[in-house]
Structures are given as structure tokens and as C-alpha cells.
Amino acid sequence: MVGPTDAEWVRGGTAAQLHDTSECLLGRERQLAEIDGCLRDPAGPRLVLVRGERGIGRSTFAHATAQRLREEGIAVLPVACGPGDSEHPLLLALRIVLALEEHRAATAKLRPGGQPAAEALSAVEQGDRTTMAEAFTAALKQPAPAAVVVDDAHHGDAESLALLEGAASEVVAHGARLVVTAALPATSGSTPRSSPSGRPVEEPTGGLAAHTIVLPRLGLEEVTAVVARRLRAAPDADLAGRIHHLSRGIPGAVDALLVAWAGQGAILILDGVASLTVGTPMPVLPDGDRYIAALYALGEPCWTVAAALSVLWPLGRPAAALAAASTALSADAVDDGIRRLVDEGIVDELPGAAGAASRGWMFRVPLVAHAVHKRLGPLERSRLSAAAVEALWAGREAADAGASRGHPAAAILDEADAETCLPDWIADAGVLVDRERAVAELTAAAVPLYPDLERRGMMRWFRGAIRLIEQPIARDLAMLQYGQAAYGCGDYTMARSVAESIVRTPAAGLDPLTLHGVATLLVAAVSAQEDWSTLSHMCTARWWDELPLPALTAVTGRVQALFQMERWREALPLLSRTEPVWRTDPDSRMMLEWYRMIAEFVLGRPDRFTHAPPTPQMPDVPRAKVFAITVAEFDFLLGVGDLHRGTALVSARGLTPEMLPPSSRFLQQHLQGRWDDALALARWILVNGGMLNGVPGQHLLPARTAAILLSRGRTTSAGRLIASVRGQAGGRLEHLLDHADAAVLRTLGDLGGAEATLRRGLSAADERGSLYGTDELWASLAEVHADAGHTGQAVACLERLERLAEQTDSGRTRLLYLLTSVRVLRPDPAGARDRLLEAVGLARSRSQPFETAVTLAAAARADAAPAKLLHEAYELFGETGAALWRFHTRTAMREAGVAVPGRKQATAENERLLATLIAEGLANRQIATVLRLSEDAVANRLSRLFTRTGLRSRTEVVAAVLRGNPLTPDGH
């Protein structure tokens, strides 16, 4: 079986691979055009200086320039400088002379080692700068055209750089061109280094060259383009933004991030979009990295100072004094180390306001600060962090007491993350600071970050607090918070481990409500891990009775296990038998009502749920519990298609849609017709292996995602997604997936397969007594029978659907019945008209674009409503991006004599849909079935596609689709 590709929709995605992009220098188009203009102009500058900071890509730029010159037939003579060259006077000049003389000799077919070369060698031996200048100028003036590319000239010796500056202005029109790369100059005020001859080594400056090009950092769009080219997949906004932030737009740092994360398998691709898995930490640069190597080369005290600043820099100028106090260095040594770090471009000095003294220092590249920080030993990190904590606490106390006059209190720089700095320091300081205060501050910082999908520090802070807590009950409470945080972050293994440790040995005196929370966490974590064997054992009283837990905890844990296994017939009687246990507090009473309401609905008794008004704020219930129950209710309501009621519920509880989990927002966006946004969320959730929606709608997200893909012609992608999320036998119901799977089979013309799949789903639901979601299966099964000409079986299915509509009083079920009845009871035009008119009114009242479009199109095609409704349906299908439905609606509009707007756009959409079906791997016969055309018609359309676009084969069509390129002659 062929493994998943980057373009496929499969749970977990596929690991990204890095691709070589040496043939394309992204983000440097303007600078390349600039240097091309200089070098191609006969009267242009003889020397071009390319400048930029470490990692900016000077060498890559020089190599690209050299390659372009070679392609034009110009000889390129590379000369590279390296560390230590500055210790050898006139070495760079000698290398340039020898390279030019060797080229001249080869061109003129002479023996190498002419007069300039001999003079240059003699000048180096004797230290004769005058003779070298003459030889250097003579070599540059040789008529053999060439370009000398000198890389990293800032390592060159001072004498050679001076000769280069002087000789460049004397080169004749047909002499050699010079391209020189060099680092940006050191900051003003620094002490210049000296050469062995005693001359200061002047860094190359703009005055050295006739023309200077400075390579800037890359912007966000340019970084996005670089990442897309390296991964051959479009990075999502989070990945591109994080790389840009951590690299500061420096290409070398961008590449270091990509190499590290791709090597860890942390970048996953789904549907051609690359995402960074949630919780992926910043990588640690290896010793051989350019930044770390430069830092090591500086030696002491620079390394110790850099290590101290990696912790203390957010405090600004006080960091220098704290570094001295926390290390064995003097204040002067720290100041000298900071100056050298600034000169080397490792850290930047932060200017003060209006000419004031600098505010402090920060690492130029966050990636470097992290690498240095991670190289600290635990004791060293703790000591430095404790110094930062004590300084901040002292500053707060002084400010509160009004005693901060004379010396500014320690405060966190604007450039740092003030929300995370202090708790990070406290967590690292550990027992070196006040325990009680540390626990309080760590907890206060961690709680508001839940679920901390960006991994800013919540989990680390909870761990830090637990290490400092000695009292058993307080420690268990903190452990529960930590476990709940782990679950919210998707670390189900840690959540389960924490919960198991508490339920097996709870602290004496731990209250029942806390233990109820622990049991809830344990069941949820085991379910998230899809450990159905353990979960089945947890459905028994014996499993819970063996634990030292109160009755409420054992009962609620068992009920939740039964719910997760969808054993509704066992759960409901257990709720009734244990009701007195549940009514001991408001929290438990709320859970009792929720569990009972859902179980009754699923088992076909929806009155309690259908007629229950949205519960307002519940002041007696903890906020976290209110949030959890709101999410569960919201998912359930949207799972049965009740968008209005779900929206009202969230508002009544004082929440906004943005506060809901991604899986809940997906359901809302799906019903709202915001399908592009919904797919983006689905990609993120599926790539990260995050929790889907809760029972009984645990498969809503993949099922609805597959439906969106199918509506866009992505038949194979929809089928593979469904297959990738199916679980083990004996686990949860998969009838929602069966409905989505059957839709794919129907679209491909496999009515037999669709019938078998639908019956399998209905049978599985019936075994557990579940009516949830079966309305869609009965409606689809009735239509399958109608399409196959099995009228009697279709009517029987329709009758089951009608009973469901009456039983559940669900708007969606009623709408499904109305639309399906028209398909099945075709000989009844009068009745069909009435039902379709009712359906149109009901669909409009529900305000769900796709559902409304389907209803309007059905009514118009059956002549139960004006044909102009086809136009409205056509526009609604366009808003959702339902390309396949829009195609069929165009056909219906032409048949009804309704004008199709935008002929060119319609043609482009037809071609794009055809290309999509080809990219899905469908043969012409299958495409004909999907589009409801003849095979000849499909062949003709494919021929026209090739003719109009210039594409020559199905393979080229697939490549264009996968790359997201337009199907045009100049875009394929």
C-alpha cells in the first residue's frame, strides 16, 4: 500500500522533508537585479561590496552571482578568506594576484607565474607594501576579462584591504571586476583590532567600493516563501510567524530552525500545508553552528557574560550588575564582555529615549539566547534566576513602599515577554527563593494560560510549583491542575499518569469534589488514548471499588467510562439508581442533569434536552467546570445541526466563539459555511492528533471535513481521511464516519457499497440503542434505494426517518425528511411541492448556507419554487467553495433556462474541478460518474484543458494542482 503523501488528508499528516533550494535565492531578487546591473554595465563600478550581518547569506548571494556570471560566459575567480587571515599581511592581495595571473595564463595559453605573480610573492616575503601595490594593480589591469569574487573579506589583512581600496579606482575599463562580501562594520566606539604589522585592521566600508549592496533581513512574506520552497509545502501562519520571530528574518537562522525541526519530525504536512506540532520547543543550536562557534571563539569572559545575559537580559541595565554579583567576574570584566558581544553582533545594545543611556542589551537572534541558556548547568541557571527573582521582588516592594528614589527599580524590558519572564525565573530558581510566594506566583501565572497551546510555560510553571509544595493535600491539588493542563495541551500520557497516581494513593482528607475531578481526568485521558480495553474495565463497579475513593467519585467515574464507550443503556439506569449520591453539591447536580439529558436524547427520549432552555451563568460551579460543560453542550447542539441554540448557549454563559476549543469552532464554521476556515482548523487538529469532539459526536470533525472535501471534488482525499481516523473494533461508534464514507461511494457510483456501509452504521448504532446521527444515515439509505430503483425499501427507510423527525423534534431531521420524501415519493407532485416549500422556509430559518443551497436547488429543480432560486443556490455554493455542487447547479440552470453568470469564471471553475478530479487519481470513467457526464464528454473537456493551458499530460495537471498553481499557459 502506498504511504501518505504531503497532499493527503490523513490523521497525523506526513513528516516534512527539506529540499535543496540552491538554484533559487528567495527574497534577494532586488539585490540580484542591482548587482547584475552593476556588473553588466561596461561603464559600471569595477568593484561591488556586498555587506550583511552573520547568517544573512552573503556567501550564498556571492555564489548565486558567480553562477549567473558563469552562465553568461564570464570567468569567475573565487577567493575565500577565513579566521586568522588577518594575522598574515598582504595574504589576501597575494591570493587575488595569483588567481588573476593563473586565469591570464590559461586564457593566453602561457606558463603560469608571470611578472605580477613573482613580484607579489617577493613582496609578501619582504613585507614590501609598495611592490605589492604595483603587482596588485598590474594584475587587475590584465585584459583577460574576469570577475574576482572575494568572500568574507572582513577576515582579510589590513594591508590587503587598503590595497584593494586604492587599486579599485584605477582599474581600466576592460580589467577584472571585483565582488567582495564582508560583514557589517563593528559598532561605533569599539576598539579596532590590529594586524601583526601594527596597522589597525579596517573593516571593509562603503568607501572601499564603487558600489555597496547591503543585504537586509527577510520580512515575513519572504520568510514564508523561503520555508515554502524548502518544504515544498505552504507553511501555515503559525509556523511562518514563529520562524520569522525566532530567526529575526536572518536566512542562516531560518535554515537552522528548519533543519532542527524537520530532523525531529516536528513539522508535519497535511493537504500541502506545513504545520509545527503543538508543544514543539525551540531547538538548541549545535556547537558547530555559526553563532555558537563565534561565541566560543570569543572565549572568556564573553562566554560567561553571554550565559548570564541569556537569563538576565530582560532586566535591562541592572543585568550587568547582577551578572557580576552572580559570577566570579568583576564589573569591568562584565562590561568588557558585553562590549565584545555587541561588537561581534551576538547581542544588540538597546538605545535609550532621547539620547539617554542605553536601556540594556538583548540577543540579536532569540535562537542564540536559547542555545546559550540551555548550555547552563542547573545550579548556575538556578542561581542566576534567583538573582533575577529577588531583584524583581525587591523592586516591587520598594515601589510599593515609595522607596525607589535614586535607583530605578528592576523592571522587565518592553522587548521581553513580561508575562512569562518572572514565572520562568521562579521555576528555575526553585528552592533558592521563598517557597510559599513562589508557589502562589507560579500558580497565578499558569492558570490563566490554559490550555496554552502555544506552550508559553503553563506546564513548566505547574511542575515548578509541585516541586516546591510539601503539604500532601496541596500537592495533590496542584497535581490535578497539572494533569488537567497536560490534557488541555494534548499530553494525554502525562494526564493519565497524574490522575492514576492520585486515585491510587490520594492524600488523606482530599475532598470528594477534587477526587471527582481526578476521576474525570483519568477517564478522559484513557479515552483520548483510545485504550478501549482499560476503558471497558472502567465501566465496571469492580474496577472502581478497588480504589480508595468515595462513592461519588466511583459512580461518576464509572458513568463517564460508560459514556465514553457509548453504552447508553447501562449508563442511564446507573444514573437513576445513584441519583442521591449526585445531589450532594451544585457541581454534581449539574453533571447529573447533563449526563441524563444526553443519555435520554441518544436513546430516543429527547424531551428533557429539546425543551431545556440555555442555562445562564452558574455562580456556584467552578469556572473550569462551567466551561467544560458548555463546550460539551455546544458540541452536542451543533452535532444535531442546531446552530442557533448553540450560539445562544455560548452567549448565555458569557463566552465568545473565540474562547471555544478548535474542534468546537470547527463545527460552528462548518454550519456557518466558512469552509476554508473550517478546513484550516481541521488541518491543525488532525496534524497535532488533538482531541476531536466529545461523545456522542466524537467523529463529527473528520466526517464533516470529508463532506467538505467531497463537495470540492476531492473524493479520494475524503475516503483516505475517513480511513485514517477509524479506530479499533470494540471502541466507539463510527456510524458518522459510515455516513461520510457512503457519500463518497455514492458519488463514485458504487450504490451497493454505499448501501452496505450505511447498513453497517445503522446496525452498530442500534446495538447500543443510539439514535444520534442516524437521521442522516436513514435519509442517505432511502436515496440510495431510490437511485437503485428499490422503491419499497426506500419508502421503508423514509418511514423510519419520519418517525425520527417526530420523535426528536429536530429541525435538521425534519428538513432531511422533507427533502428525502420528494426523492422517494416522486409520483406525488402536489405533496412534493408542499413539502419543498416547507423545506425552503425551514432551511432559511436555520441560517446554514450549504443546507439552504441544497434545499433551494432541490425546490427549483422539482418546479416547486421559482427557477431563479437556482441562482441563489449557485451563489451560496460558491461562498462555501462547494465546487462539485456548483457544477451540477450550473447544469440545472442551463436546463431551466437560467443564465449562468460569469462565463469565463464558470469555464475556469470547470477546468479547476476537472483538474482536481484528475489529481485525486480518478480515471475518465469515474470522472464521468462524478460529473454525471459521458466518458466522451470528459475526454473532450480534458482535451480542451490541455489546449487552453499548455499542459501536456495528466501528470502535469496533477503537479499543477498539488503546487496550487493556476491552470494557465504561463502559470502551469
Image (cartoon, grey):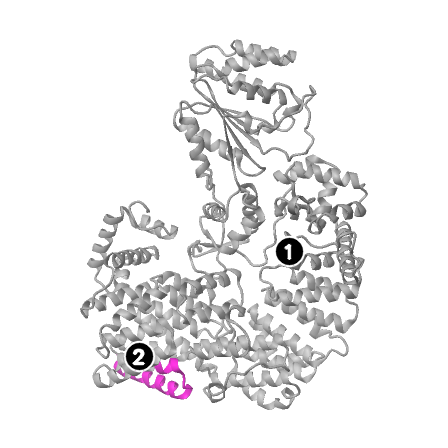
Badge 2 amino acid: Val
Q: Earlier in the sequence, mark 2 or mark 1?
A: 1
Residue 790 point in image, percent of width and height: 26, 79
- Measuring from the top left, give residue 447's x and y in whole percent: 65, 67
**Can you tell which quarter of the image residue 884 is in?**
bottom left
Left or right position of 38 against 386: left
Residue holding disc 1:
417
The image quadrant of residue 482 is: bottom right
As helix, strand or loop, the secondary structure at mark 2 comes to: helix
Across and down, in percent, residue 78 comes to 51, 25
Name the dominant secondary structure of the magenta segment: helix
Disc 2 + disc 1, Cβ < 8 Å: no
Q: Is residue 833 visible?
A: yes
- Identity of the amino acid at label 1? Asp
Badge 1 element: loop
Examine the structure image and report whether residue 603 is included in the region drawn in magenta: no
* Count of numbered marks: 2
Which residue position holds label 2?
840
Image: magenta residue range: 790-815
Residue 565 seen in render: no
Asked if 593 appears above or below 951 in the picture, the reply is below
Q: Is residue 812 magenta?
A: yes
Q: State which quarter of the image contains the N terminus.
A: bottom left
